[in-house]
Image (cartoon, grey):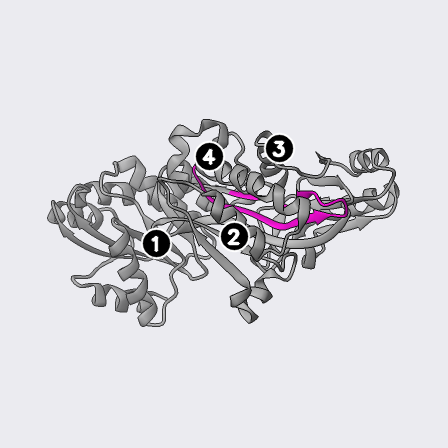
């Protein structure tokens, strides 16, 4: 789960990490009022769950309170399209109005999980700001990686080494270990998958300040992080993916027109691959899980059928914990609830497969049965 910048900065501040003064607002008038408190000069930043805001017009420097109001008005009246969003962009419901910072140096810093080394890793670069992606592509050697032993934590010698890598001098170098230690505590204490500061700046008087902040929290840790779940902004999420998440259904929206219902992540990946191999494009990844009930299957199929892109449905179920008759009853229930007439190709194997096929065959749905995954893919191609 992603947090907004202002939410991440509130967490940073609780850990003693310096951030600019600012306030999140939802109207142009409020933005003007906050900017007036900073003497008129401020920066207005769209609060969205996407990077690349600066190049997309989502970060603007205002030289007066009226400029701040105009910038906020423009952002709040439209969706923001960046290189990390789809062409439809994401809605801007709030903006963060902050004091202008005295920037002497910009750097990049992030904590994430290295899945190869199976430990947290600290990534730093002396080159930060809007062009960090280009830096990573053109000069990967300029990004330093520091693995962190999860038992020992971030060690002082590592912090000193990072300060040297960043080229910090005097007061900033002395302050670096405390800042890095605080960021690591944020990462561990809150079950984060990412803590990113871009840019981390050195001010004119030598202070280290997190000018931006990004936090992502592990979805699987939400059962013990209810305070984080309260920060969720569903307006920034894909509507269908948000519905599926609330129902504990693994779902990812894709660009194709073949709605896919599968039980098991590996089976789902194979289904997507085979579907693509015959020239059909999957509309989603969906793993309904092994112990799904009739209602959960119906909800999953309902999500598929509510996607306006979907023109045909492919079901690939291997009955085990999820019996084929349960899956069939859920499919029929969803079609009846939605009144859909979309063609459906079904491949079923395993527990109660005959009952499942009988339920679907007697339902009156436009169903085609297939024995193998290749046959199912070919049938879905013909259905298009």
Q: Earlier in the sequence, mark 3 or mark 4?
A: 3
Quickly name the residue at label 4: 190
C-alpha gap between disc 1 and disc 4: 21 Å
The reply to whether the magenta stretch includes residue 302 is: no
Which structural element holds mark 1?
loop
Position of 24 compared to 270: left or right?
A: right
Q: Nearer the viewer, residue 167 or 326?
A: 167
Please tell me whether mark 1 or mark 2 is closer to you in this view. Answer: 2
The spot of residue 222 in percent (x, y) is: 41, 33
Quickly name the residue at label 1: 117
The magenta-colored residue range is: 189-215
C-alpha gap between disc 1 and disc 2: 20 Å
Q: Nearer the viewer, residue 114 or 24?
A: 114
Q: Earlier in the sequence, mark 1 or mark 2?
A: 1
C-alpha gap between disc 3 and disc 4: 14 Å
| Mark 3 nearby-residue class (10 Å; few <14, some 14–19, many ≥20) | some
C-alpha gap between disc 3 and disc 2: 25 Å
- Residue 161 numbered mark, or none: 2
Q: Earlier in the sequence, mark 3 or mark 2?
A: 3
C-alpha gap between disc 3 and disc 1: 30 Å
Please tell me whether mark 3 or mark 4 is closer to you in this view. Answer: 3
Position of 330 compared to 253: left or right?
A: left
């Amino acid at each position: 789960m992603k947090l907004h910048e202002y939410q991440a900065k509130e967490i940073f501040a609780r850990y003693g990490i310096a951030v600019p003064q600012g306030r999140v607002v939802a109207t142009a008038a409020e933005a003007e009022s906050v900017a007036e408190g900073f003497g008129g000069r401020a920066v207005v930043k769209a609060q969205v769950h996407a990077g690349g805001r600066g190049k997309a017009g989502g970060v603007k420097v205002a030289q007066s309170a009226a400029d701040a109001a105009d910038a906020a008005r423009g952002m709040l009246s439209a969706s923001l399209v960046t290189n990390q969003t789809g062409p439809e962009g994401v809605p801007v419901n709030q903006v963060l109005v902050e004091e202008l910072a005295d920037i002497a140096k910009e750097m990049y810093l992030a904590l994430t999980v290295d899945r190869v080394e199976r430990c947290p890793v600290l990534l730093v670069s002396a080159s930060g700001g809007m062009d960090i992606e280009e830096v990573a592509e053109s000069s990967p050697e300029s990004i330093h990686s520091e693995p962190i032993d999860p038992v020992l934590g971030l060690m002082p010698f590592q912090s000193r080494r990072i300060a040297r890598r960043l080229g910090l001098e005097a007061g900033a170098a002395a302050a670096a270990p405390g800042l890095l230690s605080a960021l690591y505590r944020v990462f561990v204490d809150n079950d984060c998958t990412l803590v990113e500061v871009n840019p981390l700046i050195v001010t004119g008087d030598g202070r280290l300040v997190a000018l931006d902040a990004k936090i992502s929290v592990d979805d699987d840790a939400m059962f013990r992080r209810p305070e984080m779940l309260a920060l969720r902004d569903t307006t920034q999420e894909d509507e269908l993916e948000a519905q599926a998440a609330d129902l504990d259904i693994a779902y990812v929206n894709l660009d194709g027109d073949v709605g896919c219902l599968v039980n098991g992540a590996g089976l789902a990946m194979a289904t997507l691959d085979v579907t693509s191999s015959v020239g059909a494009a999957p509309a989603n990844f969906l793993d309904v899980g092994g112990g799904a009930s009739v209602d959960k299957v119906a909800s999953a199929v309902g999500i598929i059928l509510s996607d306006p892109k979907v023109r045909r449905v492919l079901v690939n179920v291997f009955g085990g914990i999820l019996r084929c008759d349960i899956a069939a009853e859920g499919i029929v229930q969803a079609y009846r609830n939605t009144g859909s007439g979309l063609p459906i190709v079904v491949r079923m194997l395993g527990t109660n497969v005959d009952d499942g096929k009988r339920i679907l065959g007697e339902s009156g749905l436009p169903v085609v049965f297939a024995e193998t995954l290749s046959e199912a893919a070919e049938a879905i191609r013909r259905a298009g």
